[in-house]
């Protein structure tokens, strides 16, 4: 199973994670959180990225990709561990709807 090491936290594919990042809007900076399912880790070394997906309002799936060494990335926290994952990439969740799209 693929895992991702950010500072002291280790997360795996299929975990529900909370990403905290800083957003610059005009002259102001603020913290923003994104909670979802870790569906992919790709790249090596400096080019390592990870993709997180959550179901937004009205059942629309939202995916975001972050570089692992981005300066805007503040924290990656595991909220809920995955139960049973047998794939390295969970792209099949894109085709599912409702609760089935979030149960891994």
Image (spheres, grey):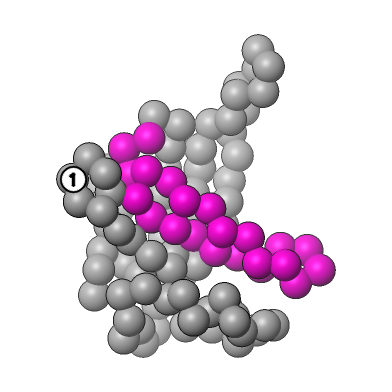
Characterize the magenta stretch by its predominant secondary structure: strand
- Residue at 18% across, 45% down: 45
| In this rendering, position of residue 84 left or right of residue 94 | left
- Residue at 57% across, 51% down: 34
| In this rendering, position of residue 86 left or right of residue 98 | left
Which of the 4 quarters of the picture holds residue 98? bottom right
Magenta range: 49-70
- Residue at 53% across, 53% down: 64
| In this rendering, position of residue 28 left or right of residue 44 | right
- Residue at 47% across, 51% down: 65
**Res 6 visible:** no
For the image, the number of numbered tags is 1
**Rendered location of residue 54, percent (x, y):** 60, 65
Q: Is residue 65 above or below residue 53?
A: above
**Rendered location of residue 84, percent (x, y):** 36, 87
**Rendered location of residue 80, percent (x, y):** 46, 70
**Res 49 visible:** yes
- Give the labeled residue for mark 1: 45
- Is residue 34 highlighted in magenta? no
- Is residue 69 highlighted in magenta? yes
Identify the secondary structure beneath mark 1: helix
């Amino acid at each position: 199973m693929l895992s991702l090491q950010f500072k002291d936290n280790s997360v795996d594919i299929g975990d529900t994670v909370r990403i905290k990042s800083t957003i610059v809007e005009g002259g102001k900076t603020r913290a923003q959180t994104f909670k979802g399912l870790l569906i992919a880790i790709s790249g090596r070394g400096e080019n390592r990225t990870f993709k997180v997906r959550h179901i937004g309002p009205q059942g629309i799936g939202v995916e975001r990709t972050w570089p692992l060494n981005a300066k805007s990335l503040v924290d990656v926290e595991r909220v809920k561990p995955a139960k049973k994952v047998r794939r390295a990439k969970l792209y099949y969740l894109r085709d599912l709807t409702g609760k089935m799209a979030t149960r891994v």
